Amino acid sequence: MSLKTALIQLDIAFGDPNKNYARAERLIGQALKEDPDVIILPELWTTGYDLTRLSSISDHEAETTKAFASRLAKVSHVNIIAGSVAKQSGDHVTNTLLAFNREGECIKEYSKAHLFRLMNEEKFLTAGDKDGLFAVDGVSSAGFICYDIRFPEWLRKHVLAGAKLLFIPAEWPKPRLDHWRTLLMSRAIENQAFVIACNRAGSDPDNTFAGHSLVISPWGEILAEADEKETVLFANIDIESIADIRSRIPVFEDRRPELY
């Protein structure tokens, strides 16, 4: 079984959801010409990091984004990992990943568990406390968001629960590009899983972002990598290769959980 992925490396308009929905739909339309199985968007792609105005620009219960992604998924019969959005629920706003199946059903909401203090997330957002597990065309998968990748035990927990595809929307700044690439390759190698990581392009008033969305094999090979510009990145994933790699180096059989 193989899956074709399309990563929408969007140049996000700061604090302008309407413009971002239009930009995303244009790029998704471009991606659909290549008949992908799954499309992924970056982190906080409807608002960017305009955190001080979340009271007016966040998405109430993510209703607008759900309607947007559900419509496109159903009409095009494609899985969509709709990045993450600022979801307003009562008095709280979460940084929430949304996943949709080919029928347009929202099959997962995962709120970022690790808030990034260097970008003041903890001042405006509430951390999630639920797992990121879901399935894409029957393949066990998990979603994480940006800073989460610095916590290998969080990703490993999901892989031990069966996840083979690790989807990671992000807004990762350019000064730490080397960390982005190294951490993602490490997460792929140590978990013997595919990493599909969609970063944003462009800049906001405080940051320039790295781009360089990546698809990495369970062997740590880079299957596809974008540059810094807005683009759609494609890669084919061979699901059967996971079992082969895990048999060649039996990491999970050789674990010693009684020690750690």
Image (cartoon, grey):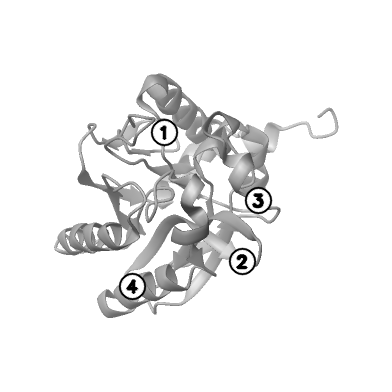
User: In the rendering, at what x and y percent does residue 70 appear?
Assistant: 38, 75
Distance between mark 1 and mark 3 Cα atoms: 20 Å
Name the secondary structure under disc 1. Answer: loop
Crowding near the residue tagged with mark 1, few <14, some 14–19, many ≥20 C-alpha atoms within 10 Å? many
Say which mark, if any, is on residue 172: 1
- The reply to whether discs 1 and 4 touch (Cβ–Cβ < 8 Å) is no
- The reply to whether discs 1 and 3 touch (Cβ–Cβ < 8 Å) is no
Name the front one of labels 2 and 1. 2
Disc 4 residue type (three-letter): Ala
Name the secondary structure under disc 3. Answer: loop
Residue matched to label 3:
126
Name the front one of labels 1 and 3. 3
Q: In this view, does 134 lie to the left or right of 216?
A: right
- The reply to whether discs 3 and 2 touch (Cβ–Cβ < 8 Å) is no
Disc 1 residue type (three-letter): Trp
Distance between mark 2 and mark 4 Cα atoms: 24 Å
Q: Which of 211 and 20 is in front in this view?
A: 20
Residue matched to label 4:
73
Name the front one of labels 2 and 4. 2
Q: Quadrant of the N terminus?
A: bottom left
Distance between mark 1 and mark 4 Cα atoms: 26 Å
Disc 2 residue type (three-letter): Ser
- Quarter residue 200 falls in: top left
Disc 3 residue type (three-letter): Thr
Distance between mark 2 and mark 1 Cα atoms: 26 Å
Taking 117 as reference, is 125 above or below it? Answer: below
Residue matched to label 2:
89
Q: Which of 85 and 28 is in front in this view?
A: 85
- The reply to whether discs 2 and 4 touch (Cβ–Cβ < 8 Å) is no
Name the secondary structure under disc 2. Answer: strand
- Judged from this view, the residue extending furthest toward the right is 258
